[in-house]
Amino acid sequence: MAVVAPKVLSLQTIFLLLMMVSLSKAVLNAHYYDQTCPQAEKIIVDTVYNASKHDPKVPARLLRMFFHDCFIRGCDASVLLDSTPGNRAEKDGPPNISIRSFYVIDDAKTKLEMACPHTVSCADIISIAARDVVAMTGGPYWNVLKGRKDGRVSKAAETINLPAPTFNVSQLIRSIAKRGLGVKDLVALSGGHSLGFSHCSSFEARLRNFSSAHDTDPSMNVEFAESLRKKCPKPNKDRNTGQFLDSTSSTFDNDYYKRILAAKGVFGSDQALFGDYRTKFIVEAFAEDQSLFFREFAASMVKLGNVGVIENGEVRLKCRAVN
Ligand code: HEM
Ligand SMILES: *[C@@H]1O[C@H](CO)[C@@H](O)[C@H](O)[C@H]1NC(C)=O
Ligand SMILES: *[C@@H]1O[C@H](CO)[C@@H](O)[C@H](O)[C@H]1NC(C)=O
Ligand SMILES: *[C@@H]1O[C@H](CO)[C@@H](O)[C@H](O)[C@H]1NC(C)=O
Ligand SMILES: *[C@@H]1O[C@H](CO)[C@@H](O)[C@H](O)[C@H]1NC(C)=O
């Protein structure tokens, strides 16, 4: 968007206007806990680091947790609330969203409550942990804006609003536009699939009886499809089988985009990014230039962390239950 400044506006006025625009959005602040809990980020990174050392699945799970939290009701830790007798919460929702490692957030929260009681929100813990797992697996580092409050509502039925791995680019763009994010954010954030694992159920529709014209999704490399069919037999006795999302699934890098170029994206929604003119050139740029990907990923994670931030929530004492 090109802004042509009328001559009557001085540079100072323009700066002021720009500041007001950014201030009106920024309830969040990089220095939010500087006075009230200066050791907050250290406590969180230590907890996340120790947990990841004991269980290498932790980084991917915490990164995915952040995405889910922010996409449903905004970044308000609604994903952490347990179901209660009267209410089925997001974490028990259909489609079963298979996010785990909640204990890591619980551990960090327990330590934070001892160090600075009733200060650090669970939503901020998730967003700091998501940055930490990316940095500790080789990805970029960024300053996390803080000051989110925790929500009081979590509804299983709302997980239907997560984008599905079968989405095409139009559907993906619509889904993220509802959260104020753009096409570049979509391609950059999809790079989160540089970490982690998927169960067969999330991609097996691409492998057999795909459409009336194609038995296998034609956008998938033939040998890759064959290897996935072996990993996901039909019928499948083991619900835990699946595929790593890229060939370096415990290192955060741009290999995800290189695999998409090679028709080896695991989800239809990953591979679709290469089949659409609106996203293809961004995939190519990130495959070619890892430092560009890192910069854009960090910037998009900050934007994702701003989605639906609430001011009238609470700081939960335990992340699994409202106060
Ligand atoms: C754009 C739309 C997206 C779709 C359709 C999507 C879909 C999925 C699906 C289906 C899974 C596998 C679930 C399973 O079978 O266990 C998954 C895993 C994962 N997603 Fe996404 N996702 C999207 C965006 C994101 C974003 C924005 C991030 C983070 C920035 C992210 C991070 C992850 C990670 C790290 C995993 C692996 C989790 C693990 O290993 O436990 N995803 N995603
Ligand atoms: C490190 O993690 C392990 C496994 O999660 C846990 O048993 C242990 O108490 C942790 N240690 C610290 C210092 O947090
Ligand atoms: C989700 O998974 C959990 C644990 O495997 C299970 O208890 C729950 O019933 C599942 N929920 C749905 C909606 O499938
Ligand atoms: C994307 O999917 C929707 C819903 O299935 C469909 O209506 C639309 O035509 C598709 N768009 C493209 C560009 O394939
Ligand atoms: C493939 O799909 C068609 C139409 O949806 C269905 O009639 C047929 O039974 C399916 N075949 C297999 C082997 O699942």
Image: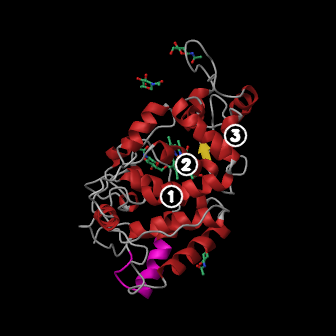
Q: Position of residue 160 (x, y in %)?
A: 37, 41
The alpha-carbon separation of the residues under discs 2 and 1 comes to: 9 Å
- Can residue 167 be seen here? The reply is no
Q: Image quadrant of ligand 5?
A: top right
Instruction: Say which amino acid is labelled 1.
Output: Ala
Q: Residue at x 57, y 21 (%)?
A: 210
The answer to which of marks 2 and 1 sits earlier in the sequence is: 2
Q: Which residues are magenta?
A: 106-120
The answer to which of marks 1 and 3 sits earlier in the sequence is: 3
Residue 114 magenta: yes
Instruction: Say which amino acid is labelled 3.
Output: Arg
Residue 299's label in the rendered image is 1
Residue 259's label in the rendered image is 3
Task: For label 1, count other residues whose C-alpha is less than 10 Å away and answer few (under 14), some (14-19) or many (20+).
Answer: some
Instruction: Say which amino acid is labelled 2.
Output: Ala
Q: Residue at x 47, y 47 (%)?
A: 97
Q: SS class of the residue under badge 2?
A: helix
Whether pointer 2 and pointer 1 mark residues with C-beta atoms closer than 8 Å, the reply is yes
Q: SS class of the residue under badge 3?
A: helix
